Image (cartoon, grey):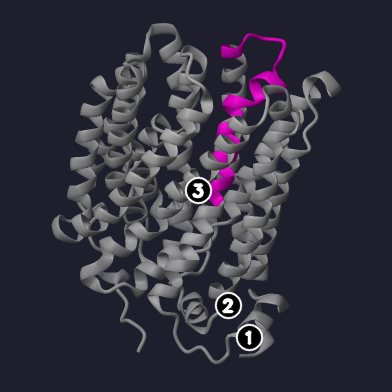
Amino acid sequence: MTAGSEPDSGAMERDARQVNVRDTRVAPGEIAIGVVIGRTSEFFDFFVYAIASVLVFPVYVFPYVDRLTGTMYSFGLFALAFVARPVGTLIFMAVDRLYGRATKLTIALFLLGCSTVAVAFLPGYESIGIWSAILLGVFRIGQGLALGGAWDGLASLLSLNAPENRRGWYAMIPQLGAPLGLIVASALFAYFVSSLSAVDFLDWGWRYPFFCAFTINVVALFARLRLVSTPDFTKLFESRDLQPTPVVKTLEKEGRNVIIGAFAPLASFALFHMVTVFPLSWIFLFTDEVPSRFLIIEAVAAFFGLGAIVLSGHLADRVGRRTLLAISAAAIAAFSGFAPQLLDAGDVGEIIFMVGGFIILGISFGQCSGVVASNFPRSERYTGAALTSDIAWLFGAGFAPLAALLLASHWGILAAGGYLLSGALATLVALWISKTLGQEERPETVQPQPA
């Protein structure tokens, strides 16, 4: 291929292809490893910031208000990344088209790592006043822009390489990164909270997980570059299976599917924060329990979520992804009606809430990426799936901790279930509107498997 026929690939991407010149095909197992590493790094960054939003920032950045108000301010900044994420997709899709996927991923993941590690050097309110909150907001926006650019198409590549009767199984693999990231982040914070005094933790102990995030991002970058530079990925890019299209053009052609696809996983995304970020804030603000203990409970419950995600792959291949999403949405709706009260029911209640919530979450969340990817024709799949994911996270998860804490602090913890119920109803309505959502790919998207 001449340079003139490959305007979308940078020199670094071509060099990387030379490294992989002897590879004729990417095995699904190899793709799966790259996907899991990439998603784990992203979710680790996510949870490190989320935990600090409860344990650190209300005191360190907002000491001039009470702890509850400071936590709400902190959750407000938390949402900025979800608002910035679609903007990041818009920017980095242009970078992808002009300079290639390797260049885009390198810039995006270094921006993500630098924005995350910058938080570790954040001066507190006592040092620079309100600028502490402003800088934190800037770093959070940087994370969001980078997450929009970190979309690599590997989940779609995995789906395209999956056997027809195992698509549910392969669809759940990218979702394993969420519980893995939470387990590592929770364990790190639990260690520092339990082994340091409160003064030392707020002074320097909380910064170490943010340093670790940068290292993990570098590892993830090389793992993903190894895959996006292979001949198989290049062929799918050139055949338009994984080619970025202009965002406006995609919305014009596939706007209906983007909107419906964004609302389909809202039940999962709402529950995602109801069993991760919100309960930590409730326990820390309204009980006498030490944070380290609940962080351990959260990490252990995440293992149950990990197993449930794996189980979702088997179930989806038996009953269909759309059916499984509908059943899990109904289960989430039922869960919202009574489960939040378990957080006020002592140690046993907390464990039941966390383990039960993670099991339901795993079964539902395990198939979200499969629904997003399968709802688009191949020419629009790469950009359409990215936009759908961005919008779903924005509406389903971005403001979930703030909304849940606001409702619970004013009308009791059961009111937090209202937000969760709204997400479950949105999912059921979206599945009803689009009867094809979550089923197998449209006929025009099915491609012959590489020889």
Residue 218 picture quarter: bottom right
Residue 405 vertical placement versus 149 (above, below): above
Q: Which residue occupies 60% across, 55% down?
A: 149
Give the mark, 2 or 3, whose residue is nearer the N terminus.
Answer: 3
- Closer to the camera, 447 or 64? 64
The residue carrying mark 2 is 229
Write the residue at 28% across / 32% down.
Answer: 424
First in sequence: mark 3 or mark 1? Answer: 1
Depth check, mark 3 against mark 1: the one in front is 3
Residue 417 in view, yes or no:
yes
Helix, strand or loop for disc 1: helix
Cα distance in 3D space between marks 2 and 3: 25 Å
Name the quadrant containing residue 348.
top left
User: Is mark 1 in CB contact (under 8 Å) with mark 2?
Assistant: yes
- Pair 2/3: label in front: 3
The residue to which callout 3 is attached is: 181
Q: Quadrant of residue 173?
A: bottom left
The region drawn magenta spans 42-68
- Label 3 Cα neighbours within 10 Å, binned few <14 / some 14-19 / many ≥20: many
Name the amino acid, label 1.
Val
- Looking at the image, residue 395 sits to the left or right of residue 312; the answer is right
Label 1: few (<14), some (14–19) or many (≥20) C-alpha neighbours in 10 Å: few
| Residue 396 appears in the rendering | no
Amino acid type at circle 2 is Ser
Q: Nearer the viewer, mark 1 or mark 2?
A: 1
The image shows residue 283 at horizontal and vertical percentages of 46, 20
> Image point 34% across, 17% down: which residue?
346
Of label 1 and label 2, which has the lower sequence position? Answer: 1
Q: Mark 1 points at which residue?
A: 19
